Image (cartoon, rainbow, N blue to C red):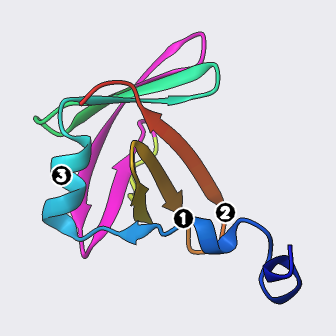
């Protein structure tokens, strides 16, 4: 309990590892992440399927030690830092927004 006075409770228990390009590809390729009631498949081909009660197809890549994706009809790529803790994957955007997913299989 005394540690909670020095650090936010739980902060010391989590040791997220930042992933580089090869580690991002290895962690995501041919895997499914679940985000509550939604899920996303990351195909090794670079295609990705996101489903939150409706399918949405896009493209993904690991570039500059970040996960990048684009979702038609938008043509630009959005990129995120990727961290891993066990079977959890965290995406962190430039503005600090965080999305956590859990690997459904490995």
Looking at the picture, how far across and down is residue 43, in whole percent?
Answer: 19, 31
Q: Residue at x 38, y 58 (%)?
A: 77
Of all residues, the one furthest to the top in this rendering is: 53
Earlier residue among tags 3 and 1 = 3
Q: Are marks 3 and 1 in contact (CB under 8 Å)?
A: no
- Counting residues from the N terminus, which is met first, the one under dot 2 or under dot 3? 3
Can you tell which quarter of the image residue 37 is in? Answer: top right
Q: Is residue 44 visible?
A: yes
Q: Are marks 2 and 1 in contact (CB under 8 Å)?
A: yes
- Name of the residue lying farthest toward the front: 2
Callout 2 crowding tier (Cα within 10 Å): few <14, some 14–19, many ≥20: few
Say if mark 2 contacts mark 3, CB within 8 Å.
Answer: no
Residue at screen point 23% across, 67% down? 63
Give yes or no for residue 62 being in the magenta stretch.
yes
Q: Secondary structure at mark 1?
A: strand
Residue marked by disc 2: 97
> Label 3 neighbourhood size at 10 Å, few (<14), some (14-19), many (20+)?
many
Indicate the position of residue 92 as horizontal and vertical percent values: 54, 64
Q: Give, as a single range, the part of the protein colored magenta.
A: 50-73
Numbered mark located on residue 92 in the image:
1
């Amino acid at each position: 309990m005394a540690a909670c006075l020095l650090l936010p409770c739980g902060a010391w228990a989590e040791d997220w590892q930042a992933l580089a390009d090869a580690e991002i590809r290895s962690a995501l390729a041919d895997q499914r992440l679940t985000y509550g009631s939604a899920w996303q498949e990351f195909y090794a081909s670079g295609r990705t399927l996101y489903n939150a009660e409706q399918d949405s197809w896009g493209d993904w890549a690991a570039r500059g030690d970040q996960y990048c994706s684009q979702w038609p009809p938008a043509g630009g790529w959005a990129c995120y830092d990727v961290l891993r803790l066990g079977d959890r994957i965290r995406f962190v955007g430039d503005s600090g927004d965080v999305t956590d997913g859990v690997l459904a299989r490995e």
